[in-house]
Image (spheres, rainbow, N blue to C red):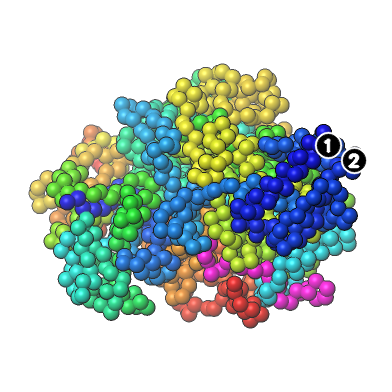
Amino acid sequence: MSARFSVILTGLAGLMRFAAWRDPAYRAQLAERDLVAQIRLRDADAGRWFELKGGRLRSRAGLHPAPEVVISYETAEIAHRLLTPAIDWGRQVEAAKNFQLRAQGDDDLVYRFTQAMIAARRAFWRYGTAAGEGVTRYTSMTNGGPCFVYVKGGRILRITPIDFEDGDAPPWTIEARGRRFTPPRKATIGPHGLAWKSLVYSPERMLYPMRRIDFDPAGERHPENRGKSGYVRISWEEALQLVAGEIRRVRTEHGQGSVLFNHPSHHTWGNIGYWTSGLFRFFNAVGTTRVNHNPDSWEGWYWGAQHHWGNTMRLGLAEPYGTVEDMLKEAELVVFWSSDPESTSGIYAGHEGSIRRQWLKDLGIPTVHIEPYYNHTAAFMQGKWIAPRPGTDAALALAIAQVWIAEGLYDRDFIAQRSVGFDAWKRYITGEEDGVPKTPEWQQAETGVPAREVRALARLWGTKRTYLGAGGMGIGWGGACRGPTGHQWARAMVCLAAMQGLGRPGVNFGNLQWGTPVDTSFWFPGYGEGGMSGDLVNTALSISLYQRMSQFPSVNTPVQVIPRVTLPEAILEGQTQGWPRDSRSIEGQFVPIRYPTPGHSRVKLFYRYGGSNLGTMPDSRRYVQMYQCAELECVVNQSIWFEGEAKFADVILPACTNFERWDISEWSNISGFAHHAQLQVNHRVAVMQHRAIEPLGESRSDWEIFRLLAQKLGLGPYYSEGMSELDWVQRMFEASDLPQRISWKEFLKKGYYVVPAPPERLRAPVAYRWFYEGRKKDLPEPHPLPSEYKQEYLSGMQTPSGKFEFDCTTLKRYAPQDEERPPILKYVRSRESVASERAARYPLQLMTPHPKYSFHTHCDGKDSTVNDIEEHRIRVGERWFWVLRINPVDAAARGIRDRSLARVFTELGEVLCVARLSHCARPGVVHAWESSARFDPAGEPGSSLDLGGAINLITPAQPQFARGHAMGNSNCLVQVAAWTGPVPACSQPDLPEASPAGQAGRV
Amino acid sequence: MQKWNLVFDVALCTGCQNCVLAVQDEYQGNEFPGYAAEMPRHGPKWFDIERRERGEFPAVDVAHRARCCQHCDQAPCREAASGGAVKKRDDGIVVIDPVLSRGQKPIADACPFGAAHWDEARAITQHWNFDAHLLDAGWKEPRPVQACPTGALRSLKLEDEAMQRLAAEQGLVRTAGGEARGTRVWYRNLTRFTHAFAAGTLVGLEAGLDACVAGAQVRLARAGEPVASARSDAFGDFRFDHLPPASEGWRIDIEAHGYHLRIVEFNLKASCWLGEIRLEPA
């Protein structure tokens, strides 16, 4: 056995020499650092040493007297098993877990040597497609869809959507009403994907690490100057030492929980390099306080609808399967209620749904659009527009139900057999309970919608097979669920759907955004499945990926959690409490979170990944106060661009974009968060995310930054397992179903694979048909979890009764006497209503829905080409202002002209916008997208006029109701005034070099 | 000889702006010698999508129109150019040479469609040249077309006669002033952008309550001549589209079962909502 061990090692040395001769990149890698490494057995004095010196490799059998790195195998048998090609990575990991394989030495040298061993095989890999004239075409993935990346001379030339080749799988066809519908053979991409080149080469890219000029970790830290001071360029070594030193210090001085990290979820893409992967492994290894993210675009569904029907693993949204085909074949009417898929593209799905909605037009199926703003989908579909005042949707819905009850226009069999508690709700609707029948005439005073239109809608809906497209995804999400009465709206949606016999042919949830007949059995991991995080608790790694791509597990030892909604209060006041997002059960939302947790330190070091909070969180000036608070002894920001919260950090670590690193992913696949989100796209596309260009300046990939920080803490080999990002990418490829269809070599070169559509007989069944017909659940989704079926596995809904509950058992049990959220849906007037006392001072209702051209803050600001789109921003003078849409009647009353500047304000602050006069906003309503990347205070940050358009500076932080943590800021009362003065200057530097100390020169 | 044409369908455009972003991506930071110099980062858009709202609350409509070089067969910019700075290629594409056009502002000034842009810094006229460099390299369609998710933009390489036939079949028209110049960009459903609508809402009484009047016969006439007729929908709404804006002397007759005949006369400045039209029960 020992002899074979020696032969293998001789072979390894030969392979390394050959690769060095063959591949310049590998040769350069070997030349980076001299080292002596020993590979040996532990039960015998046998081995071979390798010396790297000036890029040359010398290797001899035997034991070296002074090796810097020692890789040891317990026995020759184990060494033979692990070193014999083809290498089984899972075995390596298991051997390491059982201490059969060990690595000793300096973390950096160990990584370099394991990489020297592993990388030899990469010498023969080729990637990208020659496109002529020195241009190479690579592939990548964005949050707007997959793309080709054309590169010439190390620079991105263009980014385009992917047109499929002849050899790629053909798409599906749906036959409906005598017509055949097939999507085009290409992958669409959204604006926030197509504009990426301008983001890669943005003048606001940070190209080197920086330290706040008045932050001295050994002396005065000046937290009060965060957001005001400039920055000085530092080396990576200094930055890493500083951050690692601060992590060590706060853990020692303050104890567990003193480190906090917080991440956004929407700027780059990839299963290895994105946040649920390396970031989680690193922070678990460090030990951190976690932030419990409220279900911020699912609010009303999670806190409201869930109690009627469960579906907790979708945060209360509807089942999404088979609805595209069912709608095209069976539906006679589609009601879009706070539903603008042409703006939000569902989520991550490019423009895939547009062509399907065009088919609906081709078939002449009428649509109704209920929203205070005539949105892009209403404009495209040209259906009937009904515009209730923001926050009054539930009143309109109750009136529809009243007409259905009065005129017998509902599914009585379904109510009798598949639901409970209808009579209780009926007593409220008819007025038997409170003396007020909820008639169309009753709702008119609340909603502003003529009673006759509501009655006409109710009759139409009650007599035609109707799909309800609720929210941006059609199955819920976004829109009205994020407003102060969001839970009422979401509850109203599911109650109306139930009354019409949910699951009956042509009666379901959908707006053609989800529910395509793509393959649901081909397995490729989604980005919520945890990548190489090793995190079996806070990601979905344990479901499939951990078994398929074995890896070191990672465990976060502190149990302290902060609810995101009150993160600033937690820091500023030293304590907070809240309610969690827990998708396992309906009851999970009743378990309170308390901060601080006994046995834990308060947070002292905040490690922020990205910088979106000022643009996206309600009353976001709270974050300014939080950052300037001395409780935070150190703030680290890891970001690509100098924007938002990055300007409030003590140390800034510059990350690169996903065009500058390796990764692998699937379009719109967010499994782990939402199962089968690929049902939004017309073609499932798995993509090799090539490292198309080198990282700009000194920026590094997120994964690499965490690896280097881990090394400073002695966690290097634990973090990387000796592997590079590309090694992990290959491992994920092997772990997926891809190798059954395409070789690694071909995938790496070509860059993508289109998963064929299944034959018609293998298409997923239609959502809720099983429930409507009283059968066991037959959909390809592994939830609810087994214990959530109270009667029998797969029988009925997740509710305690197993039926649709109009009168919610879980609210009666755990939130009795909650007048804001009663067991049956009631209309409770919004605190942001025009009938409220504050409306005298703030008479307009501001809607802030998800944006169309940016993805939250991604693609906004930073000199992105998206800023040049007039629907997104408008240039006035030298500044691109956020757009506020206002009805001409309201504008005239305030002396506001089209394209003039206007100040929008509440008690919380004021933001300067550019006004567009538009009849798409109903009178009394103003409209602006919710998420500016820019925060440009004219004076003191947080207490002065904002020029950037960070509209959430002035939206309220109060949750939708007291006993839950639902954000409810997507509509609120404001006032608007014309701005006649000159445009003030911004008090913050725009670019790193704008601060005097930062002018050390850009790379 | 087959020549390139661009077709834009107003009804298929969602206003996603992908075509605009694709052209910016192609030319910003890039130059293609012989075809195009770099596009200024924040200059005019060579390819643009205009948004137009019509009507008034609650009867509104939004339409988009692509705006770009029309690749005229009788191109005024070519007539204004000297030294061969503007080329008309055999495939129908107009290319303004980024070197030869230097200093020739009249090239930009000559364009009647606002699609040739004077770049002060480079002292040249720039436009969207149909991505000729890509087509010459074998691309099947230019970038705005490739990036369009709905097929609102199509590029067709056809004999002129075949294009004329297609235009007749599909109701494609040229932009105003395009016939005389032989423009190669065609529009479908363009009246949604250029013309006006008149809408109204019929209100009657049922059981003492306001009610939508569905199925009413609404006839539109001008100067005594019938123009169109429609039936009100379930909400009592009716709409006549594609009317010439700034036109006078319109009249509608409304006939609904159970109601007296109602006549409404109006002048049309722009798209309008005639309001809630109350019908008298018969």
Helix, strand or loop at disc 1? helix
Residue that appears at 59% across and 72% down: A1003
Residue at screen point 50% across, 50% down: A128
User: Is residue B197 in view?
Assistant: no
Left or right: A396 in relation to B191: right
Picture coordinates of residue A569, whole percent (x, y): 73, 59
Of pointers 2 and 1, the one earlier in the residue sequence: 1
Residue holding disc 1:
A2
Residue identified by numbered label 2: A44
Does the magenta segment cover residue A440? no
Q: CA distance from mark 2 to mark 1?
A: 9 Å
Amino acid type, residue under disc 2 in the picture: Ala
Question: Is residue A202 highlighted in magenta?
Answer: yes
Return the residue nearer the eye: A772 or A174.
A174
Picture quarter containing residue A245?
bottom right
- Whole-percent x and y of residue A464? 39, 29
Region in magenta: A198-222
Chain bearing tag 1 is A
